[in-house]
Amino acid sequence: MELKALVKSFVIYSKTDQLSTKEFREKEYKGYKLKVCFGHGIVANTTWIAFLKDNNKPRKGIYPLLQYHKKLELITIIFGESEYIPPDKSWKGIDSFRSIGEYFKQNNLGKVKYSNCKLYKAYNLDGIEWTNLVQDIDSILLLHMKQGIS
């Protein structure tokens, strides 16, 4: 599967009022299962793709997470961590990264979900270099695998 095409399709689909993830089900990338969310019951302002391995799930675990903040036309890649059920493990060696909440505050962007999670990269959709985005996703996946977090 080509990740660049999938992320582009994800962004386009995020701009609709659809909640179905049918066209994104059963997708994998480099051994990671992709879990996509456009909202639960109502369309979300921030849609996301979680890169999941082994027992990690959005409700309990740690995982690389791509978010699309629709009103801001902003894509973020974060060191995802479940909010509702504390994960059994934590990300290691990411203390030097600022939280996505700090990034939003410093740039006057409002509030953000997963505000305590560390931000890896942020991209304005206008003028985005898709190849760089894919390389950064590959890099955070490598960090995830090297730490034995899966």
Image (cartoon, grey):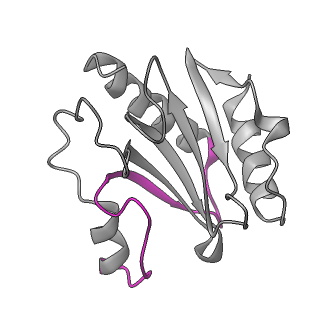
User: Does the magenta run of residues contain 12?
Assistant: no
Residue 139 figure quarter: top left
Question: Can you say which quadrant of the picture contains the C terminus?
Answer: top left
**Percent x, y for residue 91?**
24, 35
* Quadrant the N terminus occupies: top right
The correct choice, above or below, for 15 with respect to 86 in the image is below
Q: Residue at x 23, y 59 (%)?
A: 98
Q: Residue at x 63, y 77 (%)?
A: 71
Magenta stretch prevailing secondary structure: loop
**Where in the figure is residue 69, as x and y percent of width and height?**
58, 66
- Residue at image point 40% right, 33% down: 140
Looking at the image, how many numbered discs can be counted on the residues?
0
Residue 3 in picture, x, y percent from top left: 67, 32
89 sits left or right of 42 in the view: left
For residue 10, side relative to residue 37 (left or right): right
Q: Position of residue 2 (x, y in %)?
A: 73, 27
Hey, which quadrant is residue 56 in on the image? top left
State the image quarter where residue 12 is shown. bottom right
User: In the image, which residues are magenta?
Assistant: 106-130
Q: Residue at x 58, y 75 (%)?
A: 72
Task: Give left or right: position of 45 versus 132.
Answer: right
Above-or-below relation of 112 to 107: above
